[in-house]
Amino acid sequence: MPEVFVMECARPAKLGKAPLKEIQELEEKLGITLVAYEKIPSYKKLTAAGVAKLKAAEKETGAILVAYEA
């Protein structure tokens, strides 16, 4: 079985005034601090050949590649 690593790179969500106000009210009501993140796309399930191609590209570029659903 190929080695699998999970990597998530969540970014803070860009919220409008209404959703931001709603979150702030919830924070106040619950006495907590909340952080809103953008939704993370689903990972793409790759074949063994696809994984091999990504690993080769990672080795060649020195970068970490993460495959997501389009």
Image (cartoon, rainbow, N blue to C red):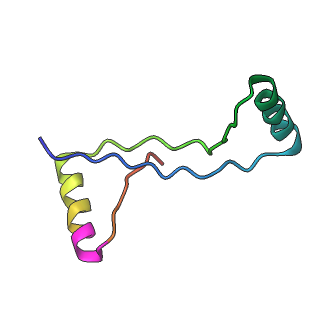
Q: Nearer the viewer, residue 66 or 13?
A: 13
Reply yes or no: does residue 15 show up in magenta.
no
Q: How many marks?
A: 0
In which quadrant is the N terminus drawn?
top left
On screen, 31 above or below 54? above
Q: Nearer the viewer, residue 24 or 7?
A: 24
Check the image and name the residue furthest to the front. Answer: 31
Specify the principal SS of the magenta part. Answer: helix
Reply yes or no: does residue 60 show up in magenta.
yes
**Residue lying at 59% horizontally and 52% vertically, measured from the top left:** 11
Q: Quadrant of residue 4?
A: top left
Q: Position of residue 30 (x, y in %)?
A: 74, 24
Quick check: 8 left or right of 54?
A: right
Quick check: 40 left or right of 30?
A: left
Q: Which residues are magenta?
A: 57-62
Q: Nearer the viewer, residue 17 or 31?
A: 31
**Residue lying at 22% horizontally and 53% vertically, measured from the top left:** 51
Quick check: 12 left or right of 29?
A: left
**Residue lying at 29% horizontally and 76% vertically, measured from the top left:** 61
On screen, 21 above or below 12? above
Q: Position of residue 26 (x, y in %)?
A: 78, 27
Q: Quadrant of residue 17?
A: top right
On screen, 23 above or below 43? above
Q: Position of residue 34 (x, y in %)?
A: 68, 37
Check the image and name the residue furthest to the bottom. Answer: 61
On screen, 21 above or below 68? above
Check the image and name the residue furthest to the left. Answer: 1
